[in-house]
Image (tube, coloured by chain):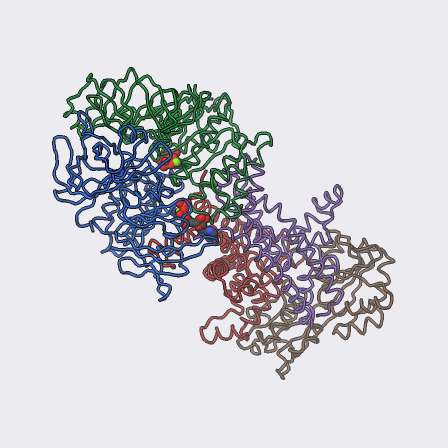
Chain colours: A green, B blue, C brown, D purple, E red
Amino acid sequence: MTLEVAIRHRLGGFALDATFVSPDSLTALFGRSGAGKTSLINVIAGLIRPDFGRIVIDGQVLVDTERGVDVPRHRRRIGYVFQEGRLFPHLSVRHNLGYGRWFTPVGERYASFDAVVDLLGIAGLLDRRPHLLSGGERQRVAIGRALLASPKLLLMDEPLASLDEGRKQEILPYIERLRDELKLPIVYVSHAHAEVTRLTATLVVLSDGKVAAVGSVGEVMGRLDLFPLTGRYEAGAVLEARVAGHDGAFGLTILDSAAGALRVPKVDLPLGTPVRVRIRARDVMLATKRPEGLSALNVLGGRIAELSRAEGPIVEARLDLNGQALLARITRKSVSDLGIGPGSPVFAVIKSIAFDHRSLGLQSASAEE
Amino acid sequence: MTLEVAIRHRLGGFALDATFVSPDSLTALFGRSGAGKTSLINVIAGLIRPDFGRIVIDGQVLVDTERGVDVPRHRRRIGYVFQEGRLFPHLSVRHNLGYGRWFTPVGERYASFDAVVDLLGIAGLLDRRPHLLSGGERQRVAIGRALLASPKLLLMDEPLASLDEGRKQEILPYIERLRDELKLPIVYVSHAHAEVTRLTATLVVLSDGKVAAVGSVGEVMGRLDLFPLTGRYEAGAVLEARVAGHDGAFGLTILDSAAGALRVPKVDLPLGTPVRVRIRARDVMLATKRPEGLSALNVLGGRIAELSRAEGPIVEARLDLNGQALLARITRKSVSDLGIGPGSPVFAVIKSIAFDHRSLGLQSASAEE
Amino acid sequence: AHAQSGDVVIFAAASLKTALDELNEVRRRESGAAARISYAASSALARQIEAGAPADLFISADLDWMDHVERRRLIRPGSRSNLLGNRLVLVGPARSTATVAIEPNFALAERLGSGRLAMALVDAVPAGKYGKAALEALGVWPSVASRLVQAENVRAALVLVARGEAPLGIVYRSDAAAEPQVRVVGTFPEGSHPPIVYPVAATSRARDDATSPWFAYLRSPAARAVFERQGFAVLQP
Amino acid sequence: MIDFTPDELSAIRLSLRVALAATIATLPIGLAVALLLARVEFWGKSLLTVLVHLPLVLPPVVTGYVLLLLFGRQGPIGAFLADHLGIVFAFRWTGAALACAVMGFPLMVRAIRLSIEMVDRRLETAAGTLGAHPLWVFATVTLPLILPGIVAGMILTFAKALGEFGATITFVSNIPGETQTLPVAIYTLTQIPGGDPAALRLTLVSVAISVVALLASELVARRILNRTVAL
Amino acid sequence: MIDFTPDELSAIRLSLRVALAATIATLPIGLAVALLLARVEFWGKSLLTVLVHLPLVLPPVVTGYVLLLLFGRQGPIGAFLADHLGIVFAFRWTGAALACAVMGFPLMVRAIRLSIEMVDRRLETAAGTLGAHPLWVFATVTLPLILPGIVAGMILTFAKALGEFGATITFVSNIPGETQTLPVAIYTLTQIPGGDPAALRLTLVSVAISVVALLASELVARRILNRTVAL
Ligand SMILES: Nc1ncnc2c1ncn2[C@@H]1O[C@H](COP(=O)(O)OP(=O)(O)OP(=O)(O)O)[C@@H](O)[C@H]1O
Ligand SMILES: Nc1ncnc2c1ncn2[C@@H]1O[C@H](COP(=O)(O)OP(=O)(O)OP(=O)(O)O)[C@@H](O)[C@H]1O
Ligand SMILES: [Mg+2]
Ligand SMILES: [Mg+2]
């Protein structure tokens, strides 16, 4: 499951020049408005033929300008959720949803109409024309239309942008399932840290048409130099862990990591399953001695590896917990009050509550790799 | 500064039946996809004439079906940021932006072209046609167009939905300034808790065309019964406080509240300015004794008023801190480990870092009320 | 169904419609062998014959177009003859009572006043050509040449007079006779213009047995009566 | 009920047949040419544009004459079609239909082209990504979206065919039952003294037919447009 | 360079003037009627639709005859206009322009109406919210968006006017220098044996004019459409 992109293309005054390899099934494109995310997706979809370069998905060459390969878009078997919907105005919602089905060989239809309609909560809209839908309804139908084409490649351009939290939490697991169970290559554009964090294996940060960074969410989001592009708010680190046990009484799951044991709200995975846990810097407190009588369940010992030099009230601390990196964001006053600096032994204090569904990037063992 | 809405309207199978009064300059509409937010805004804008009812803004009657009042939309002086952009395809960005200006009396033009263009970062796009813009660029131009009409009423339907964090953080303060300095009535639709929390004075929750709740963000978001509509993740409480001092050395501001002193990242407000501080339940830890050697700067003493009865691993605790309510979200295991229950004296531990720009609903004294 | 063999097709100038329709109807009743008659401008018909039209008989409104097809050997040699003659008249509105003596240098321009003289196209349509020749011969052409309205055909010229748009018009006697809203105020001397002749001929593709009954019929006394009632003169072959 | 003479009846029937045939026959070609002009850049595009508009620019008599020269029995195309395909236009109702089709062609092409140019092409690319071959995209997206233009083009061509006589009479003459359509019959009636009442009768018939056609087309158009009304 | 006779030159000049006048005069009325038909529901709408299409449905001779009856010196409208406003159509080039305008009217209205119906009305409401009075909305949003339709309507009317002769000659006859437009001159020539070469000359002139007009309109249309190309 790899996506290889190496293209150059000019659009008026804008130059797209992107080269990266994403080894994972899901690749998230991140970047500020106008960075070139949609343009890049359009190239993958075959809407733009790049001036130069190649795109290979899982060994299948979609475009190779040198060898003159250019698979026509209707043969790429993509499900493209456009940034602006693009529902067919002359078709009912039902027929919009069913459009891609016509062109999918019966044996390759993995998406079930009823299941998708149910998932998206659009059963009541099937006989309406798109122009009578609300913004979010339209977006859901657009997602459904792309899914029901049973694509071999899913391109999603801010698919959840105008949906409420509830809807997002219903749809995200489905996308995860496509990724994990069907190993569907997915390219996902989003501005929402929470979504990217949750979904992504590989994050590609675009800036002004160029690739500013490629890597796992943890790596990229944790890079202090990328804050202008990724945003400081959601910075954090990723811990590799394994399911070590379940605490049925309190509904908790215990994870084992190099840094120590973590208690998180229960996840339904068999013992031994590897998981990635993203811990936001803002959710980590530091203590100079092991705190007592505190509701935070997770206390991990280690030392400070690095403190960011900051002018403002806030400082990022990179911790070394038994070789595992963790980011903590604290005030400069706390650094001074606690008298800590690089090398100081500290305890990282993390509430279990911080590990909600948003930060647990769960992956079944088979998807892991 | 009040917005009075009392309307009934049918749209096909959908019935909008909304009655509420918002005493604040900014009213946020919140609700799941298809709840009727856009429809309601359309009624306010004069795009839909309601079957029955009235809409009054600041004493000015826009619609009153009983008295036959229906101010034509071009005389309502609104700036409507549509959910779907609606830029004029035949005009350059510059002329799109300038469109509303033509119709604004010179003396009433408060929005400066250069300032708005700068704010939105669209200076490089002025001579392009809308169809050559990226999704986010289009959205920014749409915001600019609405602002540059120097409206007397701003309607924003998910205006920041497809913008990156950076852009949002640039634009939100401007909207706040319009609200505070010009006392511009604003109706703001958003699915993002962060935005709503930050901006709003009055939150109106719509559900299936009806008003499910009206009140301050703190009240409404804290209501456990509204979790299905508002989402549990962002639940929290609002503290009324006053700027008590500034700690220049560490870049902190000290706020005084009934519950005690709070240290938050510096805010540029004069001493004595009343502010609202929203504290998310998930950012509050509980301790049975005052913690020491911990990076969290804010420790407030009080007692547990109520614990939610929950099946899952998570429990919400309502605290009474000197009469001031605060919500804390902790694991059931912590409740058991700490041996606390209703009436137990506890310390609420809050990182200063938790009070970022998102949770400080700052309001200058004059806007307060 | 297209023209079957045995079914005679006549191409005739449009102005003959009333008379020929009547004759055809009589013939259909009597012998059951009605012709199919296509009425159009002589020019169009001549060109169509040139292009192989399934016409058996051609009755042209002037000699020029008959000459045109004859030169191209499209009519059966010896079948051509002059069938009908007509007269040129000056018409005015029905309510006018005056008559005009049409003679050399007669005061046509004065009679028009500020109005115009309605004629068929003087260069293209036979009635117009004859009219122009007559006016030239009578010496009044220069005084009215700039005062003409040239209609597409005689009927249209007649309508202009009938509607009062033009005070006077030059048309065929056969047309004037059937229009109650106009009155003949004068008749042009026969010598003032080339003889008005409607020639008839069989096309070279026509079969003799199909056309000869029609030649005979067109020359029959019954036909003569019909033609004369319409204001035509029947010419001797 | 008005009593029609057999000739009138045959003219009415013929005119309907000719107008329908002209409209239906023009549609696919008009559609193709409109697509070509709206979507494809090619050498000689201006020439094609001019060619398409010629029947409008030329006096109908000239158009009819050109048709006669080309599609007559002796004409190059007419002879070829007659010899090889057995299709004869000369002095047949098919010729009348051809004349009407040619005269209506610019109207058909323009209307369709106009609506093709207003189609949101992003919908077509969307259909493409969903696996639809360009031909399918055309059939399932473009075609439905340009229906208003197609309806307009058809009604214009039909109306034109109901009124066309200059090219018709010049090309295929005025043979009752074969090429004498309503307008040709009307024209002939205006050529004879006393023909006006009969001409008026037929004119009213013509108008009545067009009323029916127009109302039907309006109904269709309304149904199509219903789907795009928005605030 | 071809040498034209004075008569030919005057026919060319006249035809240009008539076609331009017809096109320009039809535009505002055509626009208004198209708007009415596309946007307003009113009693008698079907009647208006039929009326608009009549010049297409009726043989041109009939249209010309009706014009003569109405706008002739003796006609009710013609007499009124002549007496009260001093506007005379009968036997004037203005009458030729009127005939061409009437004949081109259905084409103009259809083209504009088609594009009005395809306008995204949400853009108009957006302009309304920004303070634009409906008339301004029309001028600044609707009008620019329907420009392709207007251009198409104008070019169709212009082309039609270049070719129209049936209604023209019936209404205002054929007065050299006054009402003898190119098609009338061409028609006249086709009626004379041996007139073909001269007719061909004038036909080519007609075609040349239309080529220039078409190319110009294509340029304009291309500029307009450029702004809506998207992926
Ligand atoms: N004309 C109509 N006929 C039938 N249903 C309609 C019509 N217009 C709107 N609706 C329905 O009314 C509901 C409210 O629509 P509205 O656009 O106000 O939702 P919304 O709250 O803005 O949602 P979103 O967040 O998805 O934009 C939707 O379910 C929509 O399908
Ligand atoms: N044809 C064009 N001519 C000029 N500039 C163009 C053209 N097409 C795109 N651009 C510019 O290229 C840049 C990238 O556009 P793109 O749509 O890929 O951005 P994006 O990353 O998807 O942004 P957003 O998050 O706002 O949707 C934008 O600045 C856009 O204005
Ligand atoms: Mg984009
Ligand atoms: Mg909405």
Which quadrant holds the N terminus of chain B? Answer: bottom left
Residue shown at the point (30%, 51%) measured from the top left: B154
**Front-most of residues A261 and C117:** A261
Q: Residue furthest top?
A: A323
Q: Residue C19 appears at what percent x and percent y?
A: 76, 70
Residue B95 seen in this snapshot: no
Q: Residue C119 appears at what percent x and percent y?
A: 62, 69
**Front-most of residues A297 and B177:** A297
Residue E106's place in the image compared with A262, above or below, is: below
**Front-most of residues E196 and A251:** A251
Q: Residue B67 appears at what percent x and percent y?
A: 35, 67
Say which quarter of the image contains residue B258. top left
B237 left or right of A164 in image: left
Residue C102's place in the image compared with B202, above or below, is: below
Q: Residue furthest bottom?
A: C97
Question: Which quadrant of the frame does ligand 3 lie within?
Answer: top left
**Front-most of residues C134 and D135:** D135
B42 left or right of B334 in image: right
Residue B254 seen in this snapshot: yes
Q: Residue A268 appears at what percent x and percent y?
A: 43, 27
Question: How many labels sit on residues?
Answer: 0
C166 left or right of B319 in image: right
Residue shown at the point (54%, 41%) measured from the top left: D45
